[in-house]
Image (cartoon, rainbow, N blue to C red):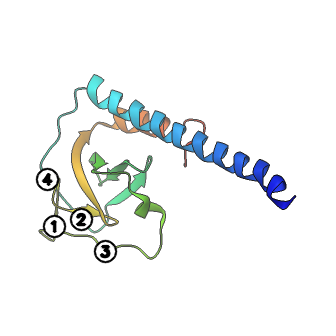
Amino acid sequence: MKRLAAIPVVLLLSACATQEDANSRDTRQAIRDFIEVRELEPVRQIRTATDDQWQDIDESFVLYLKRHEAYLFEFWRPCQELYTYPVVADVRRSGNTISARADTLRGCRIENIYPLTEAEVVELRDIGESPGSRN
């Protein structure tokens, strides 16, 4: 009897997880389409400062914000570490730069770094705030 009562709970939980995975895939695909349509060209590295900040869009992309510049970081794989504590230490080849394919953010390797305009930042934030996203 207990097994029969547990079946609806398991089905409900798996349906929620499937919906979240579908929303994450949709967001990732929308960002990849954005990169392609805007013909964004990756850069190899950027200079960093102590007041730089980042905002997650989803598990695969973050906005890296400097005082007068913005970048889109694409991770090599979905980065669950963005949402876990304690924070995983970053790997840096140089103290004042971040390099694609060598350095990490929150322990996740950065695959690509794309420079952005202010308008592109606004558009990417809108993509990240689509229904069902984590933001």
Amino acid at pointer 4: Gln
Q: Are marks 2 and 3 in contact (CB under 8 Å)?
A: no
Image depth: mark 4 or mark 2 in front: 4
Q: Name the residue carrying label 2.
A: 49
Q: Name the residue carrying label 3.
A: 89
Answer with mark 2 or mark 3, whichever residue precedes in sequence.
2
Image quadrant in which you'd find residue 120: top left
Image depth: mark 2 or mark 1 in front: 1
Q: Are marks 4 and 2 in contact (CB under 8 Å)?
A: no
Measured in 3D between alpha carbons, the distance from the residue under mark 4 to the one under mark 1, in whole angstroms, is 10 Å
Quadrant into which the N terminus falls: bottom right
For the residue pair 13 and 128, the one nearer the viewer reads as 13
Answer with mark 3 or mark 4, whichever residue precedes in sequence.
4
Q: Is residue 86 above or below residue 29?
A: below
Q: Name the residue carrying label 1.
A: 96
**Neighbour class for label 2 at 10 Å: few (<14), some, many (≥20)?**
few
In the rendered image, the residue lying farthest to the top is 37
The local secondary structure at tag 1 comes to loop
Q: Name the residue carrying label 4.
A: 45
Q: Are marks 2 and 1 in contact (CB under 8 Å)?
A: yes
Answer with mark 4 or mark 1, whichever residue precedes in sequence.
4
Measured in 3D between alpha carbons, the distance from the residue under mark 4 to the one under mark 2, in whole angstroms, is 13 Å
For the residue pair 44 and 85, the one nearer the viewer reads as 85
Image quadrant in which you'd find residue 43: top left
Measured in 3D between alpha carbons, the distance from the residue under mark 3 to the one under mark 4, in whole angstroms, is 19 Å
Amino acid at pointer 2: Ala
Image depth: mark 3 or mark 4 in front: 3
Image depth: mark 1 or mark 3 in front: 3
Q: Residue at x 76, y 51 (%)?
A: 7
